[in-house]
Image: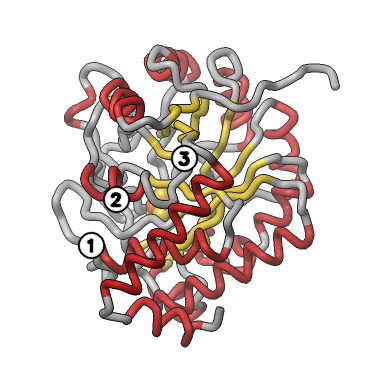
Amino acid sequence: MTPDQIRVLLNDPDRTHLEHLAEHAARLTRQYFGRAMGLYMPLYLSNYCSSHCVYCGFHSHHKITRMKLTVEEMAVEMQAIARTGVQNILLLTGESPQATPLPYLIDAVTCAKKYFQGISLEIYPLPEEGYRALYQAGADGVTIYQETYDRARYSEVHLGGEKKNYDFRREAPMRIARAGMRQISLGALLGLGPVAEDLASLYAHLREMEKAFPGVEYSLSFPRLRTIKAQEFAASSVDDITFVKILCLTRTLFPRVGINLSTRETTALRNQLIGLCVTKVSIGSKTSVGGYLEDATARDPQFDVADDRSAAEMIQYLKDHNFDPVFTDWRRIENL
Ligand code: SF4
């Protein structure tokens, strides 16, 4: 779809059209995914960051308490996550190759292998050898969002650090696929750039990846800008109705691609979208480093969570609504 076609759809005020779109999206989701709902939990390893993204609570100019987990601390947090039964973990860091170099990330993956089947990373872009080393250590997926595909806007909001390098980030999914990862998640931070253009570019990016690496399992995420400790750093221009349209449109264009939804979104909206087009949800999320520890309340989050249901509550919600919560759908086989 062209940006103009997407804009027409997003600006269409007719609720009947939205209902038809939502019904179509729900039908396709049930056809290809049944009532399975993948679960994952994020673990923030470090909030050190040498980049300056104006919309993020971890950026290098914010006066927050910086910390990174030791391997012993990671193990404690991972055990807390594993006790929920969830077998997919997403390991996150800020963009600081100095504070969290590749050997640190390999240690984190090695530690995670003791507790989880699926290990994904949301980290700074690496060269292909770096992704390969993480894959060989046991990681099987990488999440990387371009944030906005609009180069001018990208420069405006990425003021310093390695994240300023648009092309190195844009090309990361190709390097990830070449390194052997089986899952790649792409996305755009909605509200940061021109929405219709960003969506068209994201869809084109995904098509490009599907053509080059058809064997990879792809998913898309659409994080919206959030406040940080109730403070506005940038205003999202994507309201709830537009957000629902974006996810439903995506489902109709990519019937078999996973759609992830994080706890950035409210409980009510998550409940609604789970029934329409979402196939994987984060649950019980803490967005600060050390967030799963008992004394975690004073720690600085990357963004404020809007759905604060515990993992157990979310799992129960899914069961009560006739969904199958999927703790893992994949198991690593060593020595192949
Ligand atoms: S978005 Fe990532 S790179 Fe940018 S400031 Fe936040 S943690 Fe750092």
Badges 2 and 1: C-beta atoms under 8 Å apart? yes
Q: Which mark is residue 280?
A: 3
Q: Of helix, strand and loop, which one carries label 1? A: loop
Q: Mark 2 points at which residue?
A: 57
Question: Which quadrant of the structure image shows residue 301?
Answer: top left
The spot of residue 166 in percent (x, y) is 57, 68
Q: Please tell me which residue lies in front, 40 or 92.
A: 40
N-terminal label among 2 and 1: 2
Above or below, comparing residue 67 to residue 94 in the picture: above
In the image, which is nearer the foreground, mark 1 or mark 3?
Answer: 3
Question: Which quadrant of the structure image shows residue 324?
Answer: top left
Question: Which quadrant of the structure image shows residue 238?
Answer: bottom left
**Mark 2 residue crowding within 10 angstroms, few (<14) / some (14–19) / many (20+):** many
Residue at left offset 55%, top offset 20%: 116
Whether the residue under disc 2 has CB within 8 Å of ligand 1: yes
Residue at left offset 47%, top offset 87%: 4
The spot of residue 211 in percent (x, y) is 76, 62
N-terminal label among 3 and 2: 2
Q: Of helix, strand and loop, which one carries label 3? A: strand
**Mark 3 residue crowding within 10 angstroms, few (<14) / some (14–19) / many (20+):** many
**Gap between marks 2 and 1 measured at Cα:** 9 Å
Residue at left offset 62%, top offset 39%: 141
At label 1, the amino acid type is Phe
Q: Mark 1 points at which residue?
A: 233
Residue 307 can be seen, yes or no: yes
Q: Which residue lies furthest to the bottom in this view?
A: 4
Q: Please tell me which residue lies in front, 221 or 319.
A: 319
Above or below, comparing residue 296 to residue 185 in the picture: above
Where does the C terminus fall, quadrant-wise? top right
Q: Please tell me which residue lies in front, 249 or 262.
A: 249
Above or below, comparing residue 303 to residue 237 in the picture: above
